[in-house]
Amino acid sequence: MVHYLTPAEEGNRTDEKIEQEVLLEVSGINKRYSGVPVLRDVSIQVRRGEVVGLVGENGAGKSTLSKIVAGYLASDSGTIEFDGRRRKFKNVREAEAAGIVMIPQELQTAPHLTIAENMFAGSLAARGGVVNRRELFRATIEQLRFFNITADPLATLSTLTVSEQRLVMMAARLSKRASLVILDEPTAALTDDETATLFAHVRRLREQGVAWIHVTHRLDELEVIADRVVAMRDGRVAETFESPVGKRRAIVRAMIGSDVAKLRTRHTTPAPANEREVVLSLSNLSVRDPDNRDKFRVKDVSLQLRAGEVLGLFGLVGAGRTELARAIFGSWAGEVSGDVRLYGSPWRARGPADALASGVAMLTEDRKSTGILQGQSVNANISSASIRAVSPGTIISRAAEYRRNQGLARDLGVRPLNLRAAVETLSGGNQQKVLLARWLATNPRILILDEPTIGLDVGARLEVFDLIRKQAQEGRAVLLISSDLEEIVTQADKILVMYKGRINAELPPNSPRHEVMLAATGKDTQWRL
Amino acid sequence: MAIVTSDQERTEGESVRRGFSLRTLPIDPQFIALGIAFIVLAVLFQIGTSGVFFTPRNLSLLLRQGSVVAVLAAGVSVLMIMGQIDLSIGAAVYLVGVFVAQLDINSDLPIYVLVIAGIAAGCVLGAWQGFWVVKLAVPSFVVTLAGLLMFRGVGWLWTNAETVAPVSEDFIGLSESFTPTGLSVIALTVIYVVSLVAMVVSAQGDRKYGLPVDTVKLIGRIAGLTVPFVFLVWISSGFLGVPAAVVWAAAIGLVLTVVMQKTRFGRNSYLIGSNREAARFSGIPVRKLTFYSFVLMGAIYGVGAVLLTARLGSAPANMGINLELTAIAAAVIGGTSLSGGKGTVIGAIAGALLLSTIDNGMGLMNVSSFAQTVVKGAVLLLALAVDAFVNRRSLTRI
Ligand SMILES: Nc1ncnc2c1ncn2[C@@H]1O[C@H](COP(=O)(O)OP(=O)(O)OP(=O)(O)O)[C@@H](O)[C@H]1O
Ligand SMILES: [Mg+2]
């Protein structure tokens, strides 16, 4: 339910704001890559104790702007005034020293170092050059508590799931002293609970005068947390909204430059009949922790995946969804036990190559470490899992490859549509589209999608929903893993909710959200169909 | 916290890096830098040697001197693109060299059998190292460091560290003979015309299939073909013909370039080098291909050993010492990244020729070989600095 403010109310809020002191004044920023303008004459203002939502389509320039403010990038022209002083940060350290902390979209981690070392890299508690282990340990435990993560600070980071890693790194950065915090899509893979925890923290610090720039594609969050919204389009500030409440449509219009007709919430077609062929069935599948055999990441999970169906798998961070998917795909390092059947016959993927050969494809959730092939072209990134399909011989048939990839990239709306561009020059959302294209190109029978819409803008998200539906209609079986309640509830034909490695509930499509959420927090199991 | 990007694109053969204000250039700035380096050195040496440097006779010698390193640099660039390294090259070349020299001296086997035997022996060494890297997951740095010690040690045990000599005239001819002048010019012209036609036809084909064709790049490539052609014709018609060693190096360069740019193996090598995990998740047989590339490197040991033994006329105990470092340096100068995923075979060969030019020119100028080593080290540093400058990663500011 949307509450529209009366103009008077709005006016009041605005007046209040103007009195507040300006903390950050960015004026006339320009930035080009290879001569292509990415930011054009961008000016924004952030006041003390204010949360500014920064929105825009994929590639609009949000991350670039954030990086410039936080000292990761230099602008070509324009000025930044921070805390009443004209600043030109040479690097991240200078910006941090001045009080600007950023949590980038793609967090850089060292998976083989310990959790503690990762969290405090660069600010390791040291005495005379020697790292103070005890202090480090204490600080880590304290920060981990922030998102209710129980983990051994001395375990290596790679023992955590990707979303846990993200939370851990975020907690660490949030502990720094700052007067401006920039969050670039922090909530992309968080469940509502984790988002709520984050927002509580944001509010607490806002009271103390800390200002926030919050980059997001989840527009519903804006009403909850943002005091003001800046909408970007094609590298420009399209419009600024004082108080976002009730302005969702207008914000979207400012972002995409056209009307919002296609922004209905879509509901799935009714669940397909149960006589559809069972493609994949798991019985009592258990997945053990690779480092600790006694610990189960997934315990006794049984499920059936049918052709033409989208099976939703919901759960909180650490529920075991990714582990389950990886076990199916053959890419789990630990022990997997139980019975897996593919079209009725016993089957177990010995590795991703094996899984792909059997028609099982999986989009992984950690774009950076298991997805993107840095330094390579968009073309090579799309083809990486399916080069045989276009080139059965030894020599690559470039024309066939190019035509297929161009078609996929166009369908998915990859921008810029230049297959020769190096993949890391694309914005986060566009990289995600490239990865989706990679897996669609394999023409799989079973498509496992782990957080497919991470980082996608509103329009692209709906397009991906359509695409998922189309995959199902063409007879593929889709296992949709998501932390996004809305996505699961509206897109899945059947919803399985995992809690602590087990399936806690099986719910019909369009189930009430609170029921799904309750099951995900382990409250009740009586809804089992 | 670094956002690591390499402003680089690589599709269908070319490696084009766009950097800083040079970003808009259609040709790899590093190749331009290499070209400039060649020209500057040529002018310096020409002056310094009062005209001896730039003669067909000397350039022919330069090419023969550079061929062994060119072959090995081409091979190691493949491994490096995959994210591996090989420190055993010099020792492996020595061991295989001892093997073929012994065979040549102690048997009447025809020359081509000796060559095949050398390549096979090299493949065995490559497979041995590949086994440790792939099956036992020992880093290639360690495995090939062990190879560096073991292979030379085995060679010394076998020969008591005595020079194996002399190899037959026929064997020496593998590297030091020349194709007759007239035939050379005709053959070169045929090869040139065929490659030119192939390039244009392939571009036309691309256009027909809707692949965008970059005309400037095509012109760059034609120039890249024409300049060496003109030089080779000049050198070979001015001095005896094309040296056999150059034929070997060109053949290896051509084969490896086709493999790396046109085949699935080559494509997958780049992908493995740029992100091993992601490549594995894409279903690329990472371990198998890594093993193959070590065997391929082994075959290159064989070719390198035959060429070097033929050139030296023997297999002395210090044969190939530091060759791995020269080969790796050549690959790096030619744009191959030590962290994988980036580089070209042609670049590595160009790097080898640059090092050979320095050796040759400074040798003519009677600069001590100690000073030559210093200069080569400086060139390596300079190459990396140029690379860092053109790719100045405005994103990576730590
Ligand atoms: N290193 C680079 N080289 C060339 N172009 C780049 C580079 N980095 C970013 N771009 C381009 O800049 C534009 C803006 O990218 P940016 O990452 O700021 O988008 P964004 O608004 O954060 O998008 P998203 O919502 O997908 O994260 C994109 O068109 C992108 O392709
Ligand atoms: Mg972004």
Image (cartoon, rainbow, N blue to C red):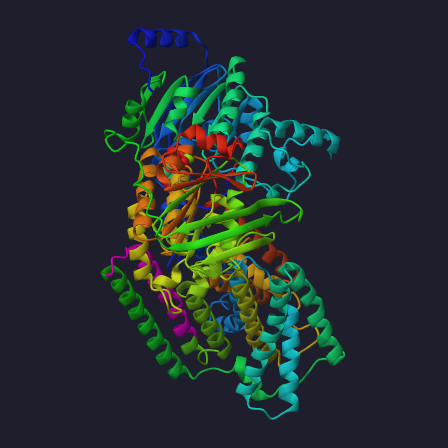
Q: Position of residue A369 (x, y in %)?
A: 51, 46
Q: Position of residue A487 (x, y in %)?
A: 38, 36
Number of callouts in the render? 0
Q: Which residues are magenta?
A: B209-235
| Quadrant position of residue B88 | bottom right
- The one nearer the camera, A94 or B346, is A94
Q: Would residue A376 appear left or right of A99 to someone viewing this image?
A: left
Q: Identify whether B163 is placed above or below B33.
A: below
Q: Identify whether A191 is placed above or below A463.
A: above
Q: Quadrant of the C terminus of chain A?
A: top left
> Does the rendering let one see residue A106?
yes
- The one nearer the camera, B51 or A253, is A253
Q: Identify whether A262 is placed above or below B28.
A: above
> Does the rendering let one see residue B341?
no
- The one nearer the camera, B334 or A317, is A317
Q: Residue at x 41, y 25 (%)?
A: A221
| Quadrant position of residue B263 | bottom left
Q: Would residue B126 appear left or right of B149 to someone viewing this image?
A: left
Magenta span includes B227: yes
Q: Position of residue B33 (x, y in %)?
A: 45, 53
Q: Residue at x 35, y 80 (%)?
A: B186
Magenta-highlighted stretch: main secondary structure? helix
Q: Position of residue A49 (x, y in %)?
A: 48, 14
Quarter of the image where ligand 1 sits: top left
Q: Residue at x 58, y 83 (%)?
A: B117
